[in-house]
Amino acid sequence: MKIVAVTACPTGIAHTYMAADALTKAAPKHKVHIKVETQGAMGIENPLNPQDIAHADKVLIVSDIEIEQMARFEGKTCVQLPIEDVLLNVDKVFLLHCR
């Protein structure tokens, strides 16, 4: 399964990057190919390109705030999750949403 994800938190510092790291590290265990964009204090980093989005089976929006450029995911299966879900139990996120 191919997943693209966007992580963002209100301050755009620690939790944004911690969630991205957790998703990236856990993905291989769940046989998921993932690319994660962060929207933090430094702006958009590791941006998802149109090809990444087009080839994704699902989009994970891991954020407690509104993300930038949400319209680019129209027509894709999107799952919105609080950032806390990924930080507390990333494996559960993959089991519930990435099958």
Image (cartoon, grey):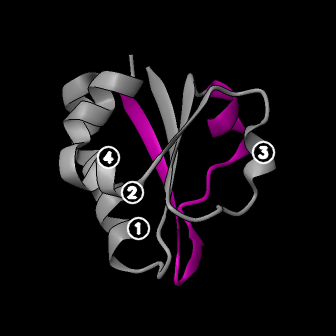
Q: Which residue is mark 3?
A: 72
Q: Secondary structure at mark 3?
A: helix
Q: Position of residue 87 (x, y in %)?
A: 25, 55
How far apart are the alpha carbons under marks 1 and 4? 11 Å
Q: Which residue is mark 1?
A: 16
Q: Position of residue 59 (x, y in %)?
A: 56, 36
Q: Which residue is mark 4?
A: 23
Q: Which residue is mark 2?
A: 83
**Which comes before the other along the chain, label 4 or label 2?**
4
**Which comes before the other along the chain, label 4 or label 3?**
4
Looking at the rendered structure, the kind of residue marked 1 is Thr
What residue is at 63 percent from the left and 26 percent from the top? Answer: 77
How far apart are the alpha carbons under marks 1 and 2? 8 Å
Q: Position of residue 31 (x, y in %)?
A: 28, 22
How far apart are the alpha carbons under marks 2 and 3? 21 Å
**Which comes before the other along the chain, label 1 or label 4?**
1
> Would residue 93 be found to the left or right of residue 39 on screen?
left
**Which comes before the other along the chain, label 1 or label 2?**
1
